[in-house]
Image: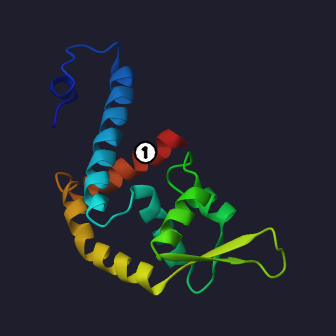
Amino acid sequence: MGNIHEDIRQKKFNNEYHKLFINLFFTGSWLHLKSIQHFKAYGISPQQYNILRILRGQLPNPCSILSISERMIDKNSNASRLVEKLRQKKLVQRQTNLNDRRAVEVSITEEGLKLLLQMDIEEEKMLAELSTLDEAEAKLLNELLDKLRG
């Protein structure tokens, strides 16, 4: 890994924007694969991890499925299905909203918090994948990505 030309065996791009598009897509896929490998050891997916982090950030308040969906990194995820899988693993709990019986509120369980604590310790391994950039470069890349999304 390191040079998009070599990584995908393409010698030429139409222009720098074409190269950027392919490079971002390739890099996103590379990061996604790394995260899947990391989370597999804990029996959850990157999307489930995202939900657990959202719920931990909401403590002590529960969070609606709609709110979870709006805050998720992967906007194509089915939050209801993911929450149900986490509930079956006893990492979250669902309650019906007392004011609106159609609404469901979700909160993280003690087991979910313990899992996140274990994963927090291991997070350094994932972040090490980004250590080829120094902090100033990481800041600049963050600013450029934010600018790109406009």
Residue 90 placement (x, y as % from top left) = 47, 77
100 lies left or right of 17: right
Q: How many marks?
A: 1
Q: Quadrant of the C terminus?
A: top right
Q: What residue sits 26% from the left and 50% below the top?
A: 34
Residue 102 placement (x, y as % from top left) = 81, 68
Residue 28 placement (x, y as % from top left) = 35, 41
> In the image shown, does 1 or 17 lie closer to the viewer?
1
> In the image shown, does 72 or 132 lie closer to the viewer?
72
In the rendered view, tell whether residue 82 sits above or below residue 105. Answer: above
Could you say whether the residue bearing mark 1 is in a helix, strand or loop? helix
Q: Quadrant of residue 76?
A: top right
Question: Disc 1 marks which residue?
Answer: 145
Q: How is the image coloured?
A: rainbow
In the rendered view, tell whether residue 89 sits above or below residue 41. Answer: below
Q: What residue sits 42% from the left and 82% below the top?
A: 111
Q: Which amino acid type is shown beneath numbered disc 1?
A: Leu
Q: Quadrant of residue 84?
A: bottom right
Mark 1, residues whose alpha carbon is within 10 Å: few (<14), some, or many (≥20)? few
Residue 52 placement (x, y as % from top left) = 47, 70
89 lies left or right of 70: left
In the rendered view, tell whether residue 147 sits above or below residue 99. Answer: above
Q: What residue sits 68% from the left and 74% below the top?
A: 105
Q: Quadrant of the N terminus?
A: top left
- Name the residue at the front extreme: 88
116 lies left or right of 30: right
